[in-house]
Amino acid sequence: MFDILMYLFENYIHSESEIFVEQSELTDELLRAGFNHREIYKALDWLEQLADLQHSDEYPYLNRVPGKSVRIFTAQECEKLDLSCRGFLMFLEQISVIDTTTREMVIDRIFALDKDVIELDDLKWVVLMVLFNVPGKEIAYAQMEDLLFEEQNGTIH
């Protein structure tokens, strides 16, 4: 499923191609690309649920006043998100790329993936997908894109 999300993001969203494609046409394209029906359905459902997160009435944990808070991760979250992933989320909050609401959206979408453990690179892509889908987060999206694609040059101290 994650491979399909990456395919869609790179070929439609990140490339700034036509985003409004009929679902049947998109499904056919994904089938031609070698993905199976079940995984395609799960990926499209994942994206639909991401869009649904915009309705905070249905997701009361997103109905917070933006500001500073401390996030205590559950044991289940710690199993799925290792220390580097949790640290990266904290880093993104500290530099104001994400706020408490978008952090919770990212965690929600992480748990909707069919992966037992999330790699840091996977987390970065999920953050990028969430920021792309949240109105008013264009600057944060650009910052995250820079973090994702930034090439490390020279020695880091």
Image (cartoon, rainbow, N blue to C red):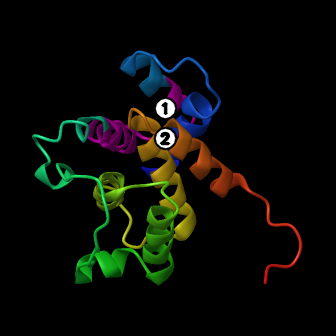
The amino acid marked with disc number 1 is Leu
Question: At 24% across and 83% down in the image, what residue appears?
Answer: 75
Residue 77, compared with residue 1, is above or below; it is below
Tell me the crowding category of disc 2: few under 14, some 14 to 19, or many 20 or more residues within 10 angstroms, Cα based: some
**Residue 26 screen position, x and y as percent:** 46, 23
Kindly identify which numbered label has been placed on residue 12.
none
Image: magenta residue range: 29-50
Residue 42, compared with residue 31, is above or below; it is below
Residue 130, compared with residue 116, is above or below; it is above
Q: Is residue 31 magenta?
A: yes
Left or right: 105 as drawn, with respect to 7: left
Kindly identify which numbered label has been placed on residue 31.
1
Left or right: 92 as drawn, with respect to 15: left
Secondary structure category for the residue under label 2: loop
Label 2 to label 1: alpha-carbon separation: 5 Å
Q: Is residue 47 magenta?
A: yes
Answer with the quarter of the image where residue 133 lies. Answer: top left
Question: At 41% across and 45% down in the image, what residue appears?
Answer: 130
Tell me the crowding category of disc 1: few under 14, some 14 to 19, or many 20 or more residues within 10 angstroms, Cα based: few
Report the front residue among 150 and 91.
Answer: 91
**Residue 28 screen position, x and y as percent:** 46, 23
- Label the magenta part by its dominant secondary structure: helix
Left or right: 28 as drawn, with respect to 17: left
Circle 2/circle 1 CB separation < 8 Å: yes
**Residue 43 screen position, x and y as percent:** 37, 42
Quadrant where the C terminus is found in the figure: bottom right
Question: At 25% across and 37% down in the image, what residue appears?
Answer: 54
Question: At 40% across and 15% down in the image, what residue appears?
Answer: 22
Kindly identify which numbered label has been placed on residue 35.
2
